[in-house]
Image: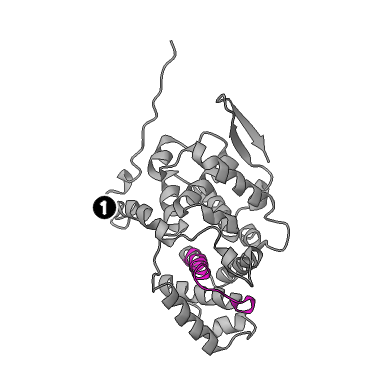
Amino acid sequence: MEDTFEENIIDIDSSDAKNPLAVVDYVDLYACYKKMENCGCVSPDYMVKQYDINERMRAILIDLLIEVHHKFDLRDETLFLTVNLIDRFLAKQIVERKKLQLVGLVAMLLASKYEEVLFPVVDDLIFISDKAYTRQELLQMEWLMLHTLQFTMSPPTAHVFMRRFLKTAQSDRKLELQSFYLIELCLVEYEMLKYSPSFLAAAAIYTAQCTLYGLGQWCKTCEWHTSYTEDELLECSRLIVGFHQKAATGKLSGVYRKYSNLSWDIQQNMNQHIFLYKKPHNQQRMYSY
């Protein structure tokens, strides 16, 4: 007679109960973030309303901003909020092609003011744009963006959930870097707007787990804290695998260059994805990409 094993859900906050910096008494905030996250999302087809810009131009802009963000050594939160501000603004405001870079720079300026202690000033952004815009144009766009978004500057982005879900996954440094690498690849891709921030964070971590450690890492504890099962994450994970495969090719390789310069060699995993595919009769197969 076979032994049955029921996996227990781990209390991931118990070890931090006496750590005042962990403030575990406030973890219920994540339930609030989950309810609020849709308020910061945009329609995944908003670009059809734009007559002078398209998805490719958005991708080029965000790829550039990822490099600018890295050179300024800004916080991760700033990057995710920058992209969120760009998408929310473009979903409400028609923008000419020549003004798209201005939108991106102003979004980074606003995100930096919100998240950073020391942040780039207007003159820095004018220099980055090769003086394509004047100080007055930046300030006017800042005013327009703030009023268009009704000064809503704190929607839950994927970064909020990444930190919590990585703790749930009991991550090490490798898993953390791989997860952030994958989700930053997703920031560039317009089609990923169809997923909520929490779902995208869970899918990135799940894909990173499979890449680094193989199958079976998405445990009951991960399901409980993220509210997403492995089956639900598979489709999104397949897309992320595709982005990972082409990350070092083409012109949009800003994320790849950023992470290839970090302490461990991200390139070693470029072609070593282990991916789970579940057949209708519940048999499991591994695919290597």
Q: Give amino acid for label 1.
A: Asp
Residue at mark 1: 25
Asked whether the viewer can see residue 251, the reply is yes
Q: Position of residue 143 (x, y in %)?
A: 45, 82
- Residue 148 is inside the magenta segment: no
Residue at figure coordinates x 59%, y 29% from the top left: 279
Main secondary structure of the magenta stretch: helix
Residue at far top of view? 1
Given residues 254 and 140, the one toward you in this image is 140
Q: Position of residue 6 (x, y in %)?
A: 39, 26
How crowded pointer 1 is (Cα within 10 Å; few <14, some 14-19, many 20+) is rated as few
Q: Position of residue 107 (x, y in %)?
A: 50, 73
**Is 136 on the left or on the right of 10, as rendered?**
right
Instruction: State the extent of the magenta-drawn residues as a range.
Output: 78-99
Q: Position of residue 199 (x, y in %)?
A: 47, 49
Asked whether the viewer can see residue 180, the reply is no
> Which quadrant is the C terminus positioned in?
top right
Residue at figure coordinates x 46%, y 54% from the top left: 197
Given residues 261 and 187, the one toward you in this image is 187
